[in-house]
Each structure stands twice: as structure tokens, then as C-alpha cells.
Image (cartoon, rainbow, N blue to C red):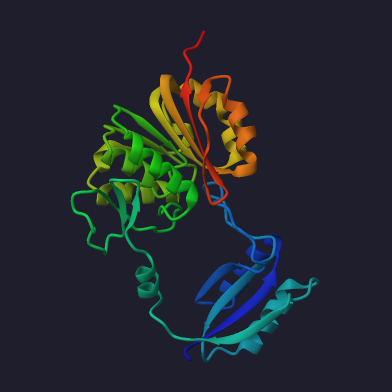
Amino acid sequence: MPWLQLVLDTTPDGAEQLSDLLSEAGACAVTFLDNADQPLYEPPPGATPLWAHTRVIGLFDADRDMGSVLAQLTKALLPASLPAHRVSPLEDKDWEREWMDSFHPMPFGKRLWICPSWHTPPDPDAVNILLDPGLAFGTGTHPTTSLCLQWLDRHGADHAQVIDYGCGSGILAVAALKLGAKHVWAVDNDPQALIATRDNAEKNRVGNAVNAVLPEALPIITTPLLLANILAQPLMEFAERFASIVEPGGHIVLSGILDHQAKAVAACYQPWFHMETPALQDDWVRLTGTRRTPE
């Protein structure tokens, strides 16, 4: 067993500090895991996803003196005490290979597939998007992303311009381009997401058609299609702004919304959009609407 893992049970407030202390103590890697079987919803871009009961795990070489590591952590945390913890051996595996083996091509609708770059697309005649998840959200496995991809598969995106607001990995931006869009503004406040979006656009040979920018760099423009896979609260806050961006007769596709939040989000958009019946998948909702002609 070439590895030892130190597992500490904590809260979101303590998790970041413990992560820093484990790194200072020589941990080869630090990860966060759920410690209470709670759902973790896709966070706002740039936010660190944490559960109310978080398990922080530090990975150490097998010959590391864990007694000294615990003593170092205990001293650094004073006057607070070291949280509940345990040390256990960890089986050596090819973790990268195991992760790659678990991510397979996935269909969305009748013609759209998301394929990891190390797989041969199962249907060469389909609309195939090559994607590596990287550090940003968006592989299509989350219902919020899946719902948007299904909409794009059904309706296409044959527009001169599309906006993907909260682009994450760029999966929706690339899908829109593969389904007919000529240009996409991919917007995110996380620089890592912008890097991932550019990389995935290049991988799919649509890099010249994507501008990945921070929100403040988005020019004053209008669009016939705006995709926003973020969270309910920012979606409600952005309703008037999005209404000013979508052209009359244009479409808005909103995701990142839990079923019990759908009515409140839809109500924020109804002054400007004719809102359609929500689409539901695993307690998550996609809202779509058509921009009314301003009076």
C-alpha cells in the first residue's frame, strides 16, 4: 500500500483551512467529499462546491509519519481542536485510467452525442462533440446540462449569434455551433471555465467561432438564442438583463433550476417572455420562453 489517507470530518467553514494545512503538511493531494449523503448542486461559476457536512481527505506517501502530521495540524488549529479523523491505507490504482474508463459516449436526443476525446464516436454520422471535462463543470452527465443539450438537439441553433451564459466547459457553446450557430459568446466569471471552453472549442474545430469572455467583457448585443445553465437565484436576478439581450421572437433556455424553484423563476421572466411548460429530469427543470414584442 503506497499511500495513506487522512480523513477529517468538518464543515464548509473549516474545509478550506484544513485543505491549506494538509497541503502545508506535505499532502500529495487534497479532496472534498460528501459526509452526509447530501446532494451537491452545480455551484455558481468560480465557487467551491461544499456540503454542510464535508469530508476533507489528504493523500500522503505510505512512509509519511502521520503522528507528526496530526501534531502539526493540532498546533495550527489552536485554540480550536482537531476534528474527528482517521488514517487508513489506500490501494494503489491507475486513477486517471479508472476515471477515463467511467466516462463513455452519451446520446442526447436523436442526433447529438458527447464523446470523450479518447473514444471513437459510436455513430460517425451523428453530431459528435469531443469533450474532456477538465476542471470546469459540464460533461452532459448532470441533468441541468442534459436538459439543455436535449433542447438544442430538438430545435437546433441555426442563428448568426448565440450566447451561452455560464459556459462552464463550453459544452453548450460547442453544441450550438455544431447544430448551426455561426458564432457564440461564451460567458463565465471563472477564468478556468473560459480556458476549458476555448480548449474544447479548438478540439471540436470551432475555436474561431467562439469568444469566451468574462461577463463585463460581453458587448452590448442582442441574440435570437440565449442559453443560461446557472442557478435559480442568479437567473431571477438576471431576468431583466436577459430580456434586453434576447431579440423579439427569440428564445431563452434556462437550467440549473430545482423543481420547487421553477414557478418563482418563470414568474420573473413572464413580463418579457411567453414561458412554456417546464421540462423535468431528476428533480431538475429546464425553462424555455419566447421573447415578446415590446409594446
Q: Is residue 139 above or below residue 214?
A: below
Q: Is residue 238 above or below residue 93?
A: above
Q: Is residue 227 left or right of residue 11?
A: left
Viewer-proximal residue, 131 or 57? 131
Q: Is residue 133 left or right of residue 91?
A: left
Q: Is residue 107 above or below residue 294?
A: below
| Outermost top residue | 295
Residue 213, percent across and down?
Answer: 41, 38
Viewer-proximal residue, 78 or 45? 45
The answer to whether residue 221 is seen in the rendering is no
Q: Residue at x 52, y 32 (%)?
A: 277
Q: Is residue 207 left or right of residue 54?
A: left
| Outermost right residue | 79
Residue 106, percent across and down?
Answer: 34, 56
Q: Residue at x 70, y 64 (%)?
A: 11
Q: Residue at x 36, y 39 (%)?
A: 152
Tag count:
0
| Outermost left residue | 125
Residue 131, percent across and down?
Answer: 32, 55
The answer to whether residue 274 is seen in the rendering is yes
